[in-house]
Image (tube, rainbow, N blue to C red):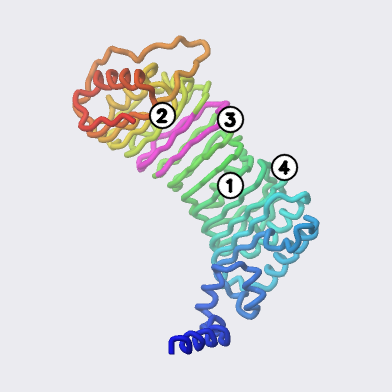
């Protein structure tokens, strides 16, 4: 009886294609999770109505010995076909993965065709040439809300005269060179832009200014100009500059909640602390050299009345405790302090000095303090310094 039942089940599963009998709206949703090439091969009459489309050149390599140019040509031809046949009114998200190619015009051509499919979310990963004449379609779409353009190597963009992205809320660029002209056009032509992410970009712009931007992330970027960040409505700020060649200044951000600042080997004066005065969580990582450059900025520090969580790391705070002391003194509502001790390091032209023993005012209480990364002698020294600045520590953890 059990065998018959099992055999009957096998016959049912083999003999009937239940997926194809599903209503089109359910089938379209399922197709969005499959390889697009497989979806087209099996459900050619339905694929043109998918809401999510993700294509990659890797899907078109049928033979390991196949010439790269041959399967790249097939991929480009496919994208062209999709652009002409897809019911774009139904498309919500389009992702196009186009890794390195020995023919850079491939990526430019694909970008132009892919841009025609943009509706709400558009993601393009490709090999952008050193000078890319950006297709006008890629920066002109009334309904586009999320745009990601990732290049494999940093290149300069030749911008079209017209940029029109009135609905764009989030923009992410990788390995792109930005100048003042592009930055000005960007904010002028994207009146709804709330999130800007720049990864491994070359920042040749002197100012990032917006009255509506809420999130700014500068991740592993190179800076070639003195740069001012004037975004009063920012809620989240993350800055990680690789060997900054110029200084950075921040204007006060009234609504700032979280700030993650990572600046190493900075040899230029910076003015960033006043801009963080309203934050509730601050992470600050740097080097002894960076701390020396912040010396002037520390003297102008205002109160951090909203600050509750504070984290420092990257340098030996038993040598230079000035920045930590400044925050302890000016953060009356601080609850948690995390210290990740770095090595002694070296500051050219500066003599190593132990953290200043003269403490004019001691804060009453900090709920939780955690110290990591140091050696035993370094940890003991750090605890003694903390005791000089804090009367009572609720819980002290050393790892």
Give the secondary structure at mark 1. Answer: strand
Disc 2 versus disc 3: distance between alpha carbons? 26 Å
Q: 397 and 194: which one is in front?
A: 397
Residue 313's disc is 2
Tell me which numbered mark, 2 or 4, is placed earlier along the sequence: 4
CB contact under 8 Å: marks 2 and 4 = no
From the top left corner, tell me how far across and down residue 149 is, in percent.
Answer: 61, 51
Left or right, 185 with reference to 318: right
Of the image marks 3 and 1, the number of the one nearer the N terminus: 1
Disc 4 is placed on an element classified as loop
Foreground tag (2 vs 1): 2
Quarter of the C terminus within the rendering: top left
Read off the magenta span: 236-263
Label 4: how many Cα within 10 Å (few below 14, some 14–19, many 20+): some
Residue 88 appears in which quarter of the rendering?
bottom right
How far apart are labels 2 and 4 at the CA level? 36 Å
- Nearer to us of marks 3 and 4 is 4
**Element at badge 3?**
loop
- Could you give the CA–CA distance between mark 1 and mark 4, rounded to whole angstroms? 15 Å
* Residue 299 visible in image: no
Specify few, some or many for label 2: CA neighbours under 10 Å numbering under 14, 14-19, or 20 or more: many
Q: CA distance from mark 3 to mark 4?
A: 20 Å
Q: Quadrant of residue 336?
A: top left
Q: Residue at x 61, y 35 (%)?
A: 204
Residue receiving disc 4: 130
Q: Which residue is mark 3?
A: 225
Is 259 part of what is drawn in magenta?
A: yes
Name the mark on residue 73: none
Going from N to C along the chain, the mark reached first, 2 or 1, is: 1
Q: Which mark is residue 173?
A: 1
């Amino acid at each position: 009886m059990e065998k018959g039942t099992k055999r009957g089940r096998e016959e049912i599963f083999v003999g009937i294609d239940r997926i194809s009998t599903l209503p089109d709206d359910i089938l379209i949703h399922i197709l969005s999770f499959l390889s697009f090439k497989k979806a087209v091969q099996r459900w050619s009459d339905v694929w043109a109505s998918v809401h999510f489309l993700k294509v990659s050149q890797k899907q078109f390599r049928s033979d390991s010995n196949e010439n790269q140019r041959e399967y790249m040509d097939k991929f480009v031809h496919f994208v062209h076909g999709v652009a002409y046949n897809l019911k774009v009114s139904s498309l919500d998200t389009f992702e196009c993965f186009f890794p390195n190619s020995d023919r850079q015009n491939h990526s430019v051509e694909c970008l132009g065709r892919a841009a025609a499919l943009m509706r709400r979310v558009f993601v393009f990963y490709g090999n952008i040439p050193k000078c890319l004449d950006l297709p006008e379609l890629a920066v002109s779409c009334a309904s586009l809300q999320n745009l990601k353009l990732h290049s494999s190597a940093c290149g300069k963009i030749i911008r079209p005269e017209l940029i029109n992205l009135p609905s764009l809320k989030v923009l992410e660029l990788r390995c792109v060179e930005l100048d003042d002209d592009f930055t000005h056009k960007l904010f002028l032509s994207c009146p709804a832009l709330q999130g800007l992410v720049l990864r491994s970009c070359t920042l040749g712009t002197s100012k990032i200014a917006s009255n509506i931007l809420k999130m700014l992330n500068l991740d592993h970027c190179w800076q070639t100009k003195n740069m001012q960040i004037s975004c009063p409505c920012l809620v989240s700020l993350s800055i990680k500059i690789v060997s900054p060649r110029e200084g950075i200044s921040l204007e006060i951000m009234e609504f700032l909640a979280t700030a993650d600042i990572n600046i190493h080997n900075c040899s230029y004066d910076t003015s960033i602390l006043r801009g963080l005065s309203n934050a509730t969580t601050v992470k600050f990582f740097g080097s002894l050299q960076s701390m020396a450059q912040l010396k002037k900025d520390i003297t102008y520090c205002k109160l951090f009345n909203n600050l509750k969580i504070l984290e420092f790391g990257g340098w030996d705070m038993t040598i230079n405790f000035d920045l930590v002391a400044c925050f302890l003194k000016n953060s009356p509502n601080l609850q948690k302090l995390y210290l990740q001790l770095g090595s002694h390091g070296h500051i050219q032209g500066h003599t190593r000095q132990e953290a200043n023993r003269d403490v004019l005012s001691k804060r009453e209480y900090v709920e939780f303090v955690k110290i990591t990364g140091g050696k035993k002698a370094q940890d003991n020294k750090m605890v003694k310094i903390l005791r000089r600045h804090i009367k009572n520590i609720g819980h002290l953890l050393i790892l």
